[in-house]
Image: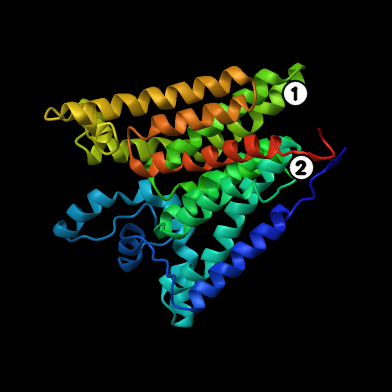
Amino acid sequence: MQRQKPVMTPAILAAITFLIYVACIFGGIYQATLWSQVGYLWDHGWTIANWQSPLSDDPADQLRANSVRPAAHRLRYFLTYPLFWLGSQLGISADRLFTSLAPLLSATTIWSVARVIVVRSGRPLTCTSLLAILPLAGIYFAMDGRMMLAFCGFAILLCAHLAPLRTAPYWVALGSAAALFLTSVSSGTFYSAFTALVVLSFGTTIRAQTMLARLHGLIPLLFILLLYHSDLSSTLEKTLAYYGGGLSGLAGMVGHGFGAYFLNLEMTPIMLSALILGMVSCVTIACWLLRRGHETSLSLVLFTSIAMGVFGYSALSLALIPACTLAGIEITRRQPTKGAK
């Protein structure tokens, strides 16, 4: 039996995405902007060399700096610092330089998702497979600047663990480090990516047949903990402090995402019913995927990404990556073959 010929490879699909974004930028249809937190740090002369120093001696400015908490924003500022620096040297706005990166970010995201679909399904992409990828490309076009980086990082994380170009653990660890660096643009996306990393690492470890293979599965997680342990703790501390600290801070974090519906005492019966129905649907779908025995790790990543939405809608939006990937794998696996009866 001869399989249906692929209409395109992940590389071709990524190239098409890249060209579409370039055309939209030159046509004035699309423009990306950096977010205010990193702009504030740049305007106050915060550099990589003095990131532990106060921004200003002005008490009023210090009050503003406390809400920004520079140390907790270190990763996201380091991520965007080259754009600010290069823009100042060339006399070009950082937003304009960031916009020029949009085609590369979008193409990398689509390529990573498409590669996972091809590798995990064992089948080439076809026209029907694109039904799972095109919605992601459309949503990606409507995102703000920092979520583009977060989506790209989350897609790279899945690709590094589920469809790596090289299976050596240190390559997976480097891919994971780059992925978390990109997702550091938001506290919610940073922790959502870290949670996904834990799931993927332990999934590899559990499936391993030998002790050496189990240790290899934990190398990426141990590397990330060694590299980002201070950022993980400072980000959590910053977020709790921003919402009041302690239990009140935790309640404030919950209120930042769809967990706010649990704290809303004036919730109508219709809203409560819709919330319960949505939660039951998500749990049902996750259990169905787990029972099928296919892509258990990816299904758990989807479930944990949805759960992280309690703390923020930006973290919840990352669930689109594993959702589209799972849908693409299932659709591609069901592709008919020529000559099949």
**In the rendered image of this protein, does residue 293 appear above or below residue 73?**
above
Q: Using the image as rendered, state which of residue 226 and residue 77 is in the foreground.
A: 77
Q: Using the image as rendered, state which of residue 6 and residue 165 is in the foreground.
A: 6
- Tell me the residue that label 1 is attached to: 213
Q: Looking at the rendering, in which quadrant would you find the C terminus?
A: top right
Measured from the top left, where is residue 131 in percent x and y? Answer: 58, 48
On residue 166, the disc is: 2
Instruction: Name which of mark 1 and mark 2 comes first in the sequence.
Output: 2
Q: Looking at the rendering, in which quadrant would you find the N terminus?
A: top right
List the single residue furthest toward the bottom: 91
Q: Secondary structure at mark 1?
A: helix
**In the rendered image of this protein, does residue 232 appear above or below residue 132?**
above
Measured from the top left, where is residue 66 in percent x and y? Answer: 23, 49
Whether tag 1 and tag 2 are in contact, CB under 8 A, the answer is no
List the single residue furthest toward the right: 1
- Residue type at tag 1: Ala
- Residue type at tag 2: Arg
Q: CA distance from mark 1 to mark 2?
A: 15 Å
Which residue is drawn at the image coordinates 11% and 30% (left, top)? 266
Q: Using the image as rendered, state which of residue 125 and residue 148 is in the foreground.
A: 125
